[in-house]
Amino acid sequence: MKSSLPRTKIHTGGNDNDRTHTSSSAAAVAGATAVSTLPSTGPANASAPEAGKQAPGIYRYKVGSYEMTQIADGARTFPMPDNFVTGATPAEAKKALADAYMPDGKLTIMFNPLVINTGSKLILIDTGNGPAAYAQTKGQVGQLHGNLAAAGIDRKAIDVVLISHMHGDHINGLRNADGTPAFPNAEILVPTGEWAFWMNDANRSKANPYNHNYFPNVKKVMTGLESKVTKYEWGKEILPGIHSIGTPGHTPGHTSFMVQSGNGKLLVQSDVCNNPLMFMNHTDWIAPFDNDPALTLKTRHKFYDMASAEKVLVAGYHFSFPAVGHVEKNGKNFRLVPVLWTPI
Ligand SMILES: [Zn+2]
C-alpha cells in the first residue's frame, strides 16, 4: 500500500515528480493495484474548495419528553489582560490558558443559548450577543438567529424568552440589528432582582468596574420592551417543569434553572462559572464579570457540590459546544465531563 502514496504526489507537481517516477517504476504493479482500490482520495481532496466557515452549531437531546436544542451563538477570542483573574497571579492564569490549549495568552469565551420544546411551549433561554455584534465581529458571535433558522426554528414561534441575567451576551439578541424586537410573539421572563438592580442607576455605585459600564446597555436593550416583560421570583416553577434557582454573585439577580420532565433532569447553570477550563478547573478563580466575588464563590461551590453529588446533567452558557455535560469533584476543584455527541 505504501507504494501508492508517492503516486498521489504526481498531482501536486514540483520536485516530487523525480522521486515519484523512481518509486512508481519499482512498484508499478503494486502501485497500479493500490490506485485502482483508492480511486480518488488525493486529487479530489486537493481540488475541493474549502468551506471557510463552521457548520451551524445545533445539538439536540432529550430531557424526559422535552426536546432540548443547544444553539451556538459563537465565540470570542481575545488576549487575556494581566489581572483578569482574581485569585491567581498573571503567570498562574496564563499557565492555565496554556494547560487548556488556548495558545498565545488568548482566552476564548463561548456563548450557548438553549431552546426547550416542552410540547406545548417553545422556550429560549438567553439570547446571545445579537445581530449587531454579528456584523461587528464578522460573524464570530451573534450567530443565534442564523443557527435558529438552520435548526428549523422560527423566531416568531418562540413563546417565551427566559433571561438568566442581564449581561449583554445574554440579552442583546432580544433586538434585531435595526432595533426591532427579535422575538415579537414572546413573553420575556426576567428575574425580579435582576430587573431591580439594572434598571435603577442608583445601583451603579454598587457594581464593580466591569458591571458599572454595563448599565447603559441594559437600558438600551430593555427600554421599550417593558410591556413584554414579566418578572419572576426564585424557588418557583416559573414554566411547566422549569424551576428558578437563585445563584447570585455573578450578578445580584443571577438565576439558574432546573428542568424536569419524566425521569429527565437538566440543570441550566447560566454563568455560575465562565469558561470551565479556567473557572471550574480552578473553582476559586473569579472573572471581572463576577460582580460580588465572595457571593459568586459561595454560590459556585454550593451549586457544583449539588450537581456533582446528584450526577445531574448540566448545561452551561459558556461551556464549549454543545455546552452540556456532568460536573465532577476534582480535589478542591471541580471539572466538566462533556457529553458524548449522540446521533439521535
Ligand atoms: Zn455570560
Image: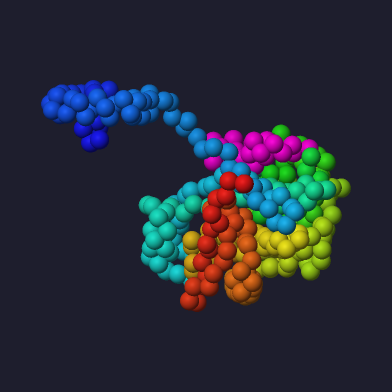
- At horizontal 72% and vertical 39% (from top left) the residue drawn is 153
Quarter of the image where the N terminus is located: top left
How far across and down, in percent of the image, does residue 278 sit?
A: 49, 62
Query: Is residue 328 left or right of 63 when viewed as pictured?
Result: left
The one nearer the camera, 5 or 299, is 5
Task: Note whether 317 is above or below 283 in the view shown.
Answer: above
Name the quadrant containing residue 235.
bottom right
Residue at point 73%, 67% (across, down):
245
Pick whichever, 203 or 76, lies toward us. Answer: 76
Q: Nearer the viewer, residue 107 or 56?
A: 56
Judge left or right: residue 274 versus residue 237: left
**Left or right of residue 182: residue 81:** left
Colour approach in the figure: rainbow
Residue 156 point in image, percent of width and height? 78, 37
- Above or below, 22 against 177 in this view is above
Q: Which residues are magenta?
A: 131-156
Q: Residue at x 73, y 68 (%)?
A: 246
Using residue 102 as the reference point, say whether residue 187 is left or right of it: right
Q: Is residue 143 magenta?
A: yes
Q: Position of residue 344 (x, y in %)?
A: 62, 46
